[in-house]
């Protein structure tokens, strides 16, 4: 059983299908032209699918800790250092 919670922001989704092409067992584009979670699959596939989404419409969290796995925040990436 996956430890991931996957959420798709339908307002951001443009229905390009990149998530489906990377993880077709997890994602599909529905009749309304929006991506949806419809199955289960490998956690790494789900994360990769979120990473290739051109509008960052897919959010992935660890279901046990609540930690956001994707998208990474600036702090998680190392952040922008505005100090001079």
Image: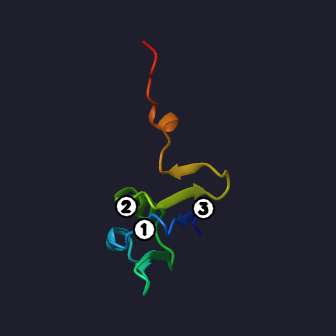
**Which callout, 2 or 3, points to the residue nearer the camera?**
2
Q: Are marks 1 and 2 in contact (CB under 8 Å)?
A: yes
The colour scheme is rainbow
Mark 1 closeness class: few <14, some 14–19, many ≥20 residues within 10 Å: many
* In the depicted structure, whether residue 39 falls above or below residue 42: below
Q: Which residue position is annotated with label 1?
A: 13
Q: Quadrant of the N terminus?
A: bottom right
Residue drawn at x 60%, y 61% is 3
Across and down, in percent, residue 31 comes to 42, 87
Q: Which residue is mark 2?
A: 53
The answer to whether 74 appears left or right of 3 in the picture is: left
Q: Earlier in the sequence, mark 1 or mark 2?
A: 1
- Residue 68 vertical placement versus 81 (above, below): below
Task: Assess disc 2: are there few (<14), some (14-19) or many (≥20) residues with their C-alpha within 10 Å of its C-alpha.
Answer: many
Rendering coords of residue 60 (x, y %): 53, 58
Rendered location of residue 61, percent (x, y): 58, 56
Inter-mark Cα distance, 2 to 3: 21 Å
Tell me the SS state at disc 1. Answer: loop
Work out how far the residue at label 1 is from the one at label 2, CA to CA, in angstroms.
8 Å
Q: Label 3, secondary structure: give it.
A: loop
The reply to whether the C-beta atoms of the residues labelled 1 and 3 are less than 8 Å apart is no
Question: Which secondary structure lies at badge 2?
Answer: loop
Task: Give the position of the C terminus as an image quadrant.
Answer: top left
Work out whether mark 2 precedes mark 3 in sequence or the reverse, and give the earlier one. 3
Q: Earlier in the sequence, mark 1 or mark 3?
A: 3
Task: Give the residue number, with chain letter if any, for mark 3.
Answer: 3
> To which quarter of the image does residue 64 belong?
bottom right
Q: Is residue 43 left or right of residue 64?
A: left
Indicate the position of residue 83 as horizontal and vertical percent values. Answer: 46, 16
* Mark drawn on residue 63: none
Mark 3: few, some, or many residues within 10 Å (few <14, many ≥20)? few
């Amino acid at each position: 059983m996956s430890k991931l919670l996957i959420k798709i922001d339908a307002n951001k989704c443009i229905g390009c299908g990149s998530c489906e092409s990377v993880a077709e067992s997890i994602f599909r584009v529905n009749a309304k032209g929006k991506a949806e979670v419809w199955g289960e699959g490998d956690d790494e596939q789900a994360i990769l699918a979120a990473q290739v989404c051109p509008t960052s419409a897919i959010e992935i969290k660890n279901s046990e800790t609540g930690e956001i796995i994707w998208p990474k925040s600036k702090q998680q990436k190392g952040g922008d250092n505005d100090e001079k």
